[in-house]
């Protein structure tokens, strides 16, 4: 079985890129994995051990949806696994198009698994929340409605959703009316080896 993993990817140093590189390596124990990754610096398409990496899309480009769909279609996977974080695919004017990416990928006739790295409680969508995230205090009611619709859409379009905690799953059910049956919890995990090394240095 072949899986396309749509995600930011190293050498980019964001948390999702690092998470996805570890995920891809572990998925190769069960699947053929092709990463549909972002173009970053001089990174090229290549095979990295058991993982095929296709440098497909560029952050902050209006073409990112076209590029991702094109390359996923070329790879013809059995399953499509998409990583989501707000602003992972670019600034707000591009990120708001993310549900369209999922809708078009659904037209390929393959199941979509969505990993949501953030789930925001609706009671946190206040004037202060939008101010802190640099969208200003004005029209917060409209912004709250957009974020609510956005979250409901991306969950409903997906065949299955992965979150990292029980609380995130509960928020989707309570605040966004999402059915429990399609939401699964897989904890984020930690790099135990690096944590142990830091602990040894802190306590000689």
Image (cartoon, helix red, strand yellow):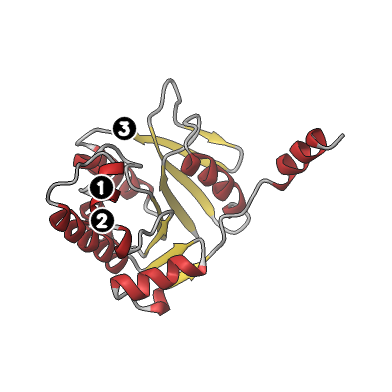
* SS state under label 2: loop
Quarter holding residue 186: bottom right
Determine the CA span between mark 3 and mark 2.
Answer: 31 Å
Q: Secondary structure at mark 1?
A: helix
Circle 1 crowding by C-alpha within 10 Å: few under 14, some 14–19, many from 20:
some
User: Along the line of sight, which residue is nearer the eye, 159 or 126?
Assistant: 126
Residue sitting nearer the eye, 132 or 97: 132
Asked whether the viewer can see residue 131, the reply is: yes
Between 41 and 3, the residue placed more toward the observer is 41
The residue singled out by tag 2 in the image is: 126
- State the image coordinates of residue 33 (x, y, percent, origin top left): 51, 49
Seen in the picture, residue 171 relative to 134 is either above or below; the reply is: below
* Rendered residue at 38%/49% (across/down): 85
The reply, left or right, for residue 75 in relation to residue 19 is left
Q: Nearer the viewer, mark 3 or mark 2?
A: 2
Q: Residue placed farthest to the right in the image?
A: 204
Q: Are marks 1 and 3 in contact (CB under 8 Å)?
A: no
Q: Earlier in the sequence, mark 1 or mark 3?
A: 3
Q: Is residue 55 left or right of residue 109?
A: right
Q: Residue furthest top?
A: 42
Percent position of residue 203, x then y: 83, 37
SS for tag 3? loop
The C terminus: image quadrant: top right
Pointer 2: residues within 10 angstroms few (<14), some, or many (20+)? some
Q: Residue at x 32, y 41 (%)?
A: 89
Residue 112 at x, y = what percent? 36, 62
Q: Are marks 2 and 1 in contact (CB under 8 Å)?
A: yes
Q: Which residue is mark 3?
A: 58
Determine which of the numbered discs, if any, sits on residue 102 in the image.
none
Question: Gap between marks 2 and 1, in whole Å?
Answer: 7 Å
Instruction: Write down the quadrant of residue 94 in the picture.
Output: top left
């Amino acid at each position: 079985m072949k899986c396309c993993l749509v995600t930011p990817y190293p050498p980019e140093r964001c948390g999702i890129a690092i998470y996805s590189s570890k995920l891809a390596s572990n998925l190769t124990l069960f699947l053929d994995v092709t990463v549909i990754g972002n173009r970053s610096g001089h990174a090229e398409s290549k095979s990295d051990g058991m993982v095929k990496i296709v440098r497909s899309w560029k952050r902050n480009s209006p073409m990112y949806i076209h590029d991702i769909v094109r390359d996923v279609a070329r790879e013809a996977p059995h399953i499509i696994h998409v990583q989501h974080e707000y602003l992972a695919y670019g600034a707000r004017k591009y990120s708001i198009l993310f549900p369209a990416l999922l809708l078009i990928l659904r037209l390929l006739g393959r199941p979509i698994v969505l990993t949501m790295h953030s789930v925001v409680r609706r009671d946190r969508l206040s004037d202060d929340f939008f101010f802190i995230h640099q969208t200003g205090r004005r029209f917060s009611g409209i912004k709250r409605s957009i974020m609510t619709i956005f979250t409901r859409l991306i969950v409903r379009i997906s065949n299955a959703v992965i979150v990292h905690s029980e609380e995130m799953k509960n928020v989707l059910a309570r605040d966004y009316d999402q059915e429990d049956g399609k939401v699964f919890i897989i904890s984020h995990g930690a790099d135990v080896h690096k944590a142990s090394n830091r602990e040894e240095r802190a306590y000689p």
